[in-house]
Image: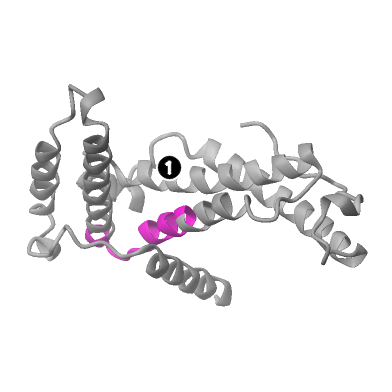
């Protein structure tokens, strides 16, 4: 991945800033951007190292065995990659454009928060069966979302995937999880609940 180097100097030209900004705000922004740069680079290095399959006997490897359709480790890497790349994009914009947009940065930062929270939620789901169960629920939800998207472009999509086959495949994998065999795979938490739960788990880790 391309190293991230957020602007070391936030735009000094007041015409590029919200009128509420002042010099002290700019100094704080420079400190925060430098901190973000270090964190993003560390995460990028971690994700590069995590591109290989999980170590044999690890918790991720155990969950992957129960989720062969879309392995849990793939889902987690995807979630974290989306989060890191979204933050990197905002930092890169600030570096190149020398300005912080008033509103446009909200969308990628929200994507970063929600996607990372989903990854944390998947990783911290307790037992091997529960992690696999959450993974299957996510795959099921994604399949439904893709079917909805494909229906919008139905005229231009003559060879649509068999989404019913995917549903049956995921339900079949669910039967291999005795603790969750009778649960409703169609139910999935909303983004707000995922962010709250992820924040709780991160806060708990910090306390320990």
Residue drawn at point x = 77 percent, y = 36 percent: 96
Q: Which residue matches tag 1?
A: 78
Is residue 200 placed above or below 74 in the rendered structure?
below
* Image position, residue 173 (x, y; %): 13, 47
Residue at 54%, 36% in the rendered image: 48
User: How far from the left and from the top, in percent, is residue 171?
Assistant: 10, 49
Q: Is residue 122 magenta-colored? A: yes
**Residue 154 appears left or right of 193:** left
How crowded pointer 1 is (Cα within 10 Å; few <14, some 14-19, many 20+) is rated as: some
60 and 34: which is toward the camera: 34
- Left or right? Give the position of 38 relative to 108: right
Tell me the residue at 87%/51% (across/down). Answer: 15
**140 or 64, which is in the foreground?**
140
Does residue 119 appear left or right of residue 69 in this picture?
right
**Colour logic:** one colour
Q: Which residues are magenta?
A: 115-130
Please say whether residue 72 is one of the residues in the magenta stretch. no
Local secondary structure at mark 1: helix
Q: Nearer the viewer, residue 26 or 47?
A: 26
Q: Quadrant of the N terminus?
A: top right
**Where is residue 205 shown, x and y percent of the image?**
52, 71
Residue 208 found in image quarter: bottom right
């Amino acid at each position: 991945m391309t190293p991230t180097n957020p602007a070391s100097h936030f735009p000094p030209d007041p015409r590029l800033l919200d009128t509420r900004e002042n010099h002290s705000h700019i100094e704080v922004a420079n400190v925060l951007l430098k901190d973000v740069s270090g964190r993003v680079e560390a995460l990028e290095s971690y994700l590069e190292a995590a591109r290989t399959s999980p170590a044999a006997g690890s918790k991720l490897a155990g969950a992957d065995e129960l989720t062969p359709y879309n392995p849990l480790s793939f889902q987690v890497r995807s979630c974290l990659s989306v989060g890191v790349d979204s933050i990197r994009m905002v930092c890169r914009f600030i570096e190149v454009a020398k300005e912080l947009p008033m509103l446009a940065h909200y969308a990628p930062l929200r994507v970063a928060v929600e996607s990372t929270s989903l990854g944390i939620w998947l990783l911290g789901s307790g037992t091997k069966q529960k992690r696999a169960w959450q993974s299957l629920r996510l795959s099921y939800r994604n399949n439904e979302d893709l079917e909805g998207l494909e229906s919008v472009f139905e005229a231009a999509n003559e060879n649509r995937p068999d989404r019913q086959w995917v549903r049956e495949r995921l339900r079949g994998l669910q039967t291999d999880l005795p603790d969750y065999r009778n649960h409703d795979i169609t139910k999935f938490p909303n983004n707000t609940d995922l962010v709250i739960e992820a924040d709780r788990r991160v806060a708990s880790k910090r306390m320990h």
